[in-house]
Amino acid sequence: MQPVTCRTCGTDVLAEKYSEAHTSIQWLTDAPRSCPRLYTDAGAGHTPAWVPSCTELRDTIDDLAHRGVMPISHRSQPVTGPVPGDLP
């Protein structure tokens, strides 16, 4: 994983790309308090709503990958559990 700073809000995370569609993010601080996009303002008198991801952070990471700054990673850690085809 490598450090990434969101170009919109400046939140620091660790991130790794495993494919065009698969990105792993590790928050270094409490995510909802760190990222202003993870809660939407539902308007006066309404409870804010949780948003499962931040498009600005995702775009920052995708841009780094497209520019070659963040290469696609190939996992080398063993995967737990049975491997398909190895079952009796």
Image: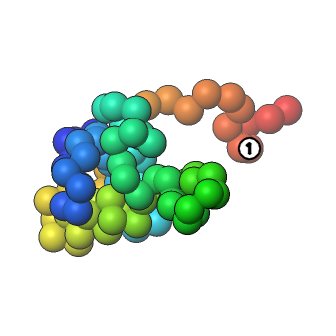
Task: Name the residue located 62 percent from the left edge and 57 percent from the top edge.
Answer: 45
Residue 12 shown left or right of residue 32 in the figure: left
Query: What's the image's color scheme?
Result: rainbow
- State which quarter of the image contains the N terminus: top left
Q: Position of residue 20 (x, y in %)?
A: 40, 67
- State which quarter of the image contains the C terminus: top right
Task: Name the residue located 40 percent from the left edge and 66 percent from the top edge.
Answer: 55
Task: Name the residue located 63 percent from the left edge and 52 percent from the top edge.
Answer: 47
Residue picked out by circle 1: 85
Q: Position of residue 61 (x, y in %)?
A: 28, 60
Query: In the figure, 11 relative to 66: above or below?
Result: above
Q: Position of residue 50 (x, y in %)?
A: 58, 52
Amino acid at pointer 1: Gly
Q: Is residue 72 visible?
A: yes
| Picture quadrant where residue 85 is located | top right
The residue lying toward the viewer, choosing from 57 and 77, is 57
Q: Is residue 26 visible?
A: no
Dot 1: element: loop
